[in-house]
Image (cartoon, grey):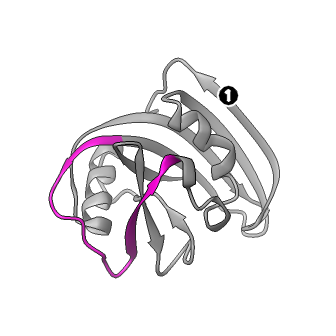
Amino acid sequence: MKKLTLCFLKENNKLLLGMKKRGFGAGRWNGFGGKLEDGESIVEAAKRETREECGLEVIDLDLRGRMEFNFITTGERLEVFVFLITRFSGKLVETEEMKPCWFEQTNLPLDEMWPDDRFWLPLFLADKKFRAEFTFGDEERIVEQNIVAVDDIAYE
């Protein structure tokens, strides 16, 4: 199973999302993140991917969710570690991969995000930790889901 990171920067009741411009998930608003490089920890990958995709340096982060995605059509399985970032520095920039934009938490572009986001984002935004599993029939259709709030999340 491929391990990935997904980071959401939050400031003053706003959430920073990026419009994915190429590759997997292109055309969708999402958090920042991606695959781990060889020898890289999950936290190191989260910080690197955030810097590469929007120019901001992560000062600290909090693991809020751990999700598994199964794609029936491709057979791909992903394990995604979801982080909340409230302390960061640097200058926000558009990159070749992502166009960042701040959104009010009460007005997120859910129709232009992954279909699963509407199910777990309320827990995330309520400062809850969670575990979730989603099975997609294709990239638009969830055929099975399970989401639970948890007290703690382990990296392994």
Q: Residue at position x 47%, y 72% from top?
A: 19
Q: Residue at position x 62%, y 68% from top?
A: 112
Residue where numbered disc 1 is placed: 148
Q: Does the magenta stretch include residue 90?
A: yes
Q: Residue at position x 70%, y 34% from top?
A: 147
Q: Nearer the viewer, residue 63 or 3?
A: 63
Answer with left or right where residue 132 lies relative to residue 83. Answer: right
Give coordinates of residue 131: x percent, y percent: 61, 33
Decide if residue 80 is in sight here: yes
Q: Residue furthest top?
A: 151
Q: Residue at position x 33%, y 60% from top?
A: 37
As drawn, 88 above or below 18: above
Say which quarter of the image contains residue 85: top left
Q: Nearer the viewer, residue 35 or 62?
A: 62
Answer with left or right where residue 143 lies relative to residue 26. Answer: right
Give coordinates of residue 148: x percent, y percent: 67, 28
Say which quarter of the image contains residue 97: bottom left
Q: Does the magenta stretch include residue 137?
A: no
Q: What stretch is highlighted in magenta?
A: 85-105
Type of residue at label 1?
A: Val
Answer with left or right where residue 135 lies relative to residue 151. Answer: right
